[in-house]
Image (cartoon, rainbow, N blue to C red):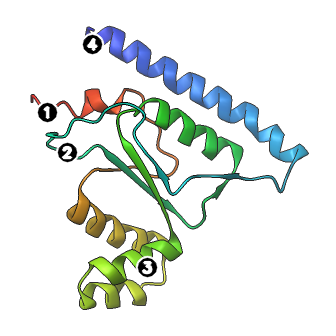
Amino acid sequence: MNNTAKVIANRLIRLTGNLFKMLSYPFHWVFPKLRFTIPAYSPAKLNMRANATIPRTIWQTNFTDQASLPVYLNYLFNRLMSLNCDYRYVSTEARGEFLKEHASPEVYDAYSRLTNGAAQADLWRLVVLNTYGGVYMDIDATLVWPLDKLLDDSQ
């Protein structure tokens, strides 16, 4: 596919995603307390490449796994664009447990002293990617191209 087609596809995906998000906000006016659960683990739906340079695992974190409809739709779309990747979501509490188990005592102590959730997530992200590899995406990030195409191991 040439670059012009890629740019057009990118823009159409972004536009469609933004329309779905915009249309989902009235849903929360009608059902203000309704939230959707982002799973802690979702296995790859297609076969993963065992010899990939970058492990096909998407990591995300947020303070809770209970998401509004726009965030949940974003999660579903990202899963559609990454069918050959494992997906792992880690809540604030689980981040601390992960670091207690996998990081050095100094790193865990530094994490425990951080009071800003974003700073805690940044430190956790460094440790989890160093330990397991994969790709980190912010909770509101949207893939606009299949992740496997972006992680082409031939380059």
Circles 3 and 4 in contact, beta carbons < 8 Å: no
Where is mark 3, residue-wise? 96
On residue 3, which mark appears? Answer: 4
Name which quarter of the figure residue 20 lies in: top right
| Residue in the foreground of this view, choosing between 44 and 135 | 44
Q: What's under tag 4, amino acid-wise?
A: Asn
Q: Is residue 104 left or right of residue 141?
A: left
Where is mark 1, residue-wise? 153
Q: Residues within 10 Å of mark 3 (few under 14, many from 20)?
A: some
On residue 25, which mark appears? Answer: none
| Residue in the foreground of this view, choosing between 34 and 10 | 34
Q: CA distance from mark 2 to mark 1?
A: 8 Å
Most extreme residue toward the right is 30
Q: Is residue 23 above or below residue 68?
A: above
User: Which residue lies at the image location 30% right of the left edge and 65% below the top edge?
Assistant: 128
Where is mark 2, residue-wise? 54
- Name the secondary structure under disc 2: loop
Q: What's under tag 1, amino acid-wise?
A: Asp
